[in-house]
Image: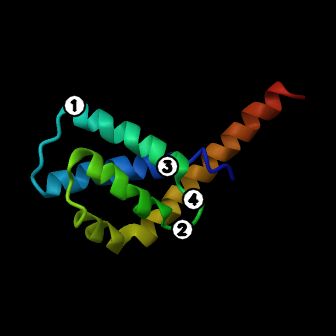
Amino acid sequence: GATINMDGTALYEAVAANFIASLYGIDLTIFQQFLIFITATFASIGAAAIPSAGLITMTLVFTSVGIPLEGIAIIIAVDRFLDMFRTMTNVWGDLIGAKVISRFFR
């Protein structure tokens, strides 16, 4: 798979950041939510294609808007289960990309 096409990881990091911010009672502004989206997108592009790599890059997303890093400990409890769905989304994105390219270059 293409490591630049990590859609599931980007979505996971953004949703996890919003969840942990809500859990800690942090009200995120529109600008902070946009910053989470941008940071999660770029962090997922730079993430290695290994299991649970999103946990490492999630620290970048959390620190970009001031969410406590202790919240990652809560995410670790369910990360193994969610990793399967992230992988499925990433592979689906790779399949769609390959199909689009195959249509244009026959």
Front position in the image: 12 or 103: 12
Q: In the picture provided, is 74 more to the left or to the right than 104?
A: left
* Image point (62%, 48%), residue name: 92
Element marked by disc 2: loop
Q: Position of residue 17 (x, y in %)?
A: 28, 51
Give the quadrant of residue 55: bottom left
Cα separation between marks 4 and 3: 8 Å
Q: Nearer the viewer, mark 4 or mark 2?
A: 4
User: Which amino acid type corresponds to the residue marked 2 in the rendered image?
Assistant: Pro
Q: In the picture provided, is 81 more to the left or to the right than 93?
A: left
| Rendered view: 51 above or below 103 | below
User: Which amino acid type corresponds to the residue marked 1 in the rendered image?
Assistant: Ile
Question: Dots 4 and 2: beta carbons under 8 Å?
Answer: no
Question: Dots 1 and 2: beta carbons under 8 Å?
Answer: no
Q: Pointer 1: what residue? A: 30
- 10 Å crowding of disc 3: few (<14), some (14-19), many (20+): many
Q: Position of residue 32 (x, y in %)?
A: 24, 37
Element marked by disc 1: helix
Question: Dots 3 and 2: beta carbons under 8 Å?
Answer: no
Q: Pointer 2: what residue? A: 51
First of labels 3, 2 by sequence position: 3
| Rendered view: 51 above or below 98 | below
Give the quadrant of residue 100: top right
Q: Pointer 3: what residue? A: 44
Q: Pointer 4: what residue? A: 48
